[in-house]
Amino acid sequence: MPASKMVLADLPEAYHMVHPGPINPTRIDYVEIAEVISDHVILPAGESLHNAVIKAAKSLGGECGTASINGGKFSRTRFTTGGPAREGKSANYTFIRDVAEKEILMGTCSFGFAEDAPHFVHCHARFVSDDSPTEMGGHLFSPDCIIDEPISAQMNVFIGASITKRASEETLHAIFEIDKHAPPQTSDEYGREYFIRVHPNEDLPNALENFCQSQGIENAIISASLGSLNAPALSMRGDIQKISSVGTEAISFHGEVMTNENGHPTASILTNLVDEAGTEFCGYLIKGHAPVCITAEIYLMEVKDPAVLATMRQVRDVSY
């Protein structure tokens, strides 16, 4: 469905979805990661996206984490998009699309363990084909996406923290949940790092601001993060648009949380979204109008020097 442009005062109230199961009283789960190994790798041709990501993670010393991918090509691409209620779930996938060669523009992965398999790779991506200039995107079935041309990946591998895909009683979807760990015994001289899972109907900017406030974090970077939102509103260079689709897939969340002049954390989150038709939208989430649909998987890094965040924001604003 197309987005509608409007002014901030005309935005309707955020849409909160009623899920079939009992509401989990914990609305934000998180783990402080003892160590994150970040490195650039090339995912080779001939592998499935799933196997290539897990092999790359193991080569760096872990099996859980997040990654940003871009470039390369799939010889086979299997994906779907988020949509309305079906099969007892308040939001569900639409239909599976099998397409031939697709060039990857960008994407985000979370990867870890699974109760029903050794590993799981949760990936959302944008792509385009040689025979059509129209960009598409959605949730990839990573074992069925075969790499034809190598993919560039920025890996963030967690050491001392793990995530496992389990069935959620609240949504009936299988999603990554955070395994419990003892707090890391390392110095936070250079800033702490977290994997955060935000639960359904929580406003994402509000949730991350409250999280930073509770942890005493003044400034932080949001990177290599993904999830889904319910009919969010976006702002870009003064234009405001409302996405009408529920279960809108977030290809990526990037941005920062910075302490304002009043001493309160303020989130600025840029996102690339696709609706149920696979149409892409880009903009900054409007606080109070960005409720999580099923889950949001956030990699957040505390930054001690606020000048670093200011520089990153300037570069991003020029890029977009």
Image (cartoon, grey):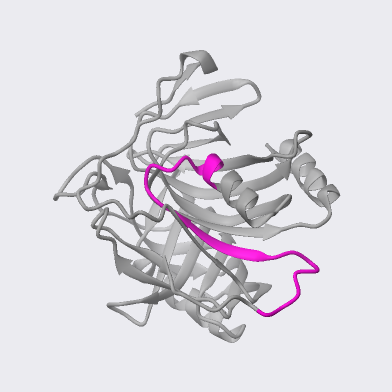
Q: Which is nearer the eye, 130 or 48? A: 48
Residue 81 percent location from the top left of the image:
33, 47
Q: Residue at x 76, y 57 (%)?
A: 303
Q: What quarter of the picture does the C terminus occupy? A: top right
Span highlighted in magenta in the image: 185-207
Rendered residue at 35%/31% (across/down): 15
Q: Is 144 left or right of 205, judged from the image as shown?
A: left
Above or below 183: residue 92: above
Residue 107, above or below 34: above
Query: Where residue 96 appears, x then y in whole percent?
Result: 26, 54
Where residue 156 sits in the image (x, y, percent)? 61, 70
Q: Name the quadrant containing residue 187.
A: bottom right
Residue 114: x percent and y percent? 35, 75
Say above or below: 172 vs 167.
above
| Observer-nearest of 35 and 100 | 35
In this picture, residue 251 sits left or right of residue 236: left
Which of the pair 236/52 is nearer the observer?
236
- Does the segment drawn in magenta span residue 275? no
